[in-house]
Amino acid sequence: MVSAALVAKVLSQAVTLAVHSWEYGTVCEALLEWKNPEWSVFGADPFPGGKLPVLNVDQVDALNYVKPHIRTNNVTLVDGAGAAGDPASLGVPALLIGKTNSVYTDAAVRQEKHLVNDVPRWPNGAISQRESLPELWADEVYMAPPFLAYYAVAKNNLALAKESAGQCLLYRDVLVTPTGPWYHITGPQTKDFGLWSTGNGWAASGMARVLSTLRKSPFNSATESEQSSLTAAIKHIIDSAIALDTDSSGLLRNYLNDTTWFGEISGTAMLTATTFRLAVLAPDSFGGKYTKWAEKKMGVVDAGIDAGTGIVSPAINPLNWHDRTPFTTGSPEGQSFVVLMHAAYRDWKAKKR
Ligand SMILES: *[C@@H]1O[C@H](CO)[C@@H](O)[C@H](O)[C@H]1NC(C)=O
Ligand SMILES: *[C@@H]1O[C@H](CO)[C@@H](O)[C@H](O)[C@H]1NC(C)=O
């Protein structure tokens, strides 16, 4: 078991290395879940009285960190470099900061309207990951639906709460393979019909955030069927990842079913984190078999942490998922996933006692 001080080192590398829209959002979520778990959607009561909490931004590291990265003069919260989904990853903190600074709420409102009204859609209604054309990336499930779910609570909008889960399931309908894992990308411009480990991690973990948001919200009983659909979709991914977990490294391969690929920490950490979250949210479906697997994967990921620098390796190159050279200088998202894994493990342990 690694120390909290070492996890903090892993996290501080994530903060230092992040330079892209989705990386800011993911670092922010890692900071929140690690340092202020009570205000993440996995906390016991993240919506006191059914509402978003009013926090002192200066006292919440996640919000303090991300605030300068949120722009308040545009339709999106940060430049997504063509991605429609990625800027939405700053939506949750924008809404939280907005409780004491309405300029940020206004920015979040513009972002939500843009996503829902302007961004192209797949024929089945799934909101595109791209601004310019309909294209579905598994990654998007971590970026937009958790924001839409949180926004639904902020605006007391049951239809949007249901829609946030619905968006995940529309992505699932298009990307899921017969054996369970999801393809990475489909669309006219970019295609990746491989079972990208990190993509499956983004999808499963994004769905877990939506599930927990709905569960802790005033919409809990009104969204029971959405919650059980999300639980089943997550389980389908985790079950297939476990079935394909056969690499001698002990890590999931970058492409889960392709034995020519190396095992790597990013997808492994994210799917492990999700398993611990689901062991708390849906213990009947995620019993001891799952947490034993997750504890084992955590041990292998942790063995890849450099105790001096806090860098975790081998990761997949976060900007080129086809890169056959293991990435060893610190993946911003991979560093965040390892922190999310430890936050999820800690919270599962606390619940278990
Ligand atoms: C909004 O951001 C886009 C890039 O994300 C930029 O091209 C555009 O000029 C910005 N608009 C304003 C009003 O700043
Ligand atoms: C992995 O799974 C995908 C999707 O089902 C399939 O297209 C591909 O051929 C498989 N690759 C290997 C190496 O089995």
Image (tube, grey):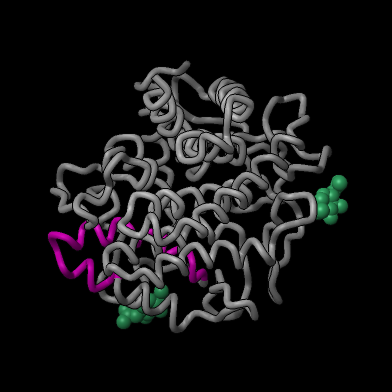
Occupied quadrant, residue 342: top left
Q: In the rendered view, tell whether residue 302 sits above or below residue 206.
A: above
Q: Mark yes or no: residue 304 visible.
A: no
Give the residue drawn at x 51%, y 59%.
Answer: 226
Extreme residue in the bottom direction: 118
Task: Name the quarter where the C terminus is drawn.
Answer: top left
160 on left or right of 186:
left
Image coords of residue 179 (percent x, y): 79, 50
Occupied quadrant, residue 339: top left
Image coords of residue 85 (percent x, y): 49, 66
Q: Which residues are magenta?
A: 83-108
Give the residue drawn at x 78%, y 30%.
Answer: 246
Give the residue drawn at x 44%, y 83%.
Answer: 117
Query: Looking at this view, is 253 or 233 the one in front?
Result: 233
Image coords of residue 4 (percent x, y): 36, 22
Is 153 colored magenta in this rendering?
no
Is 99 colored magenta in this rendering?
yes
Give the residue drawn at x 70%, y 42%.
Answer: 254
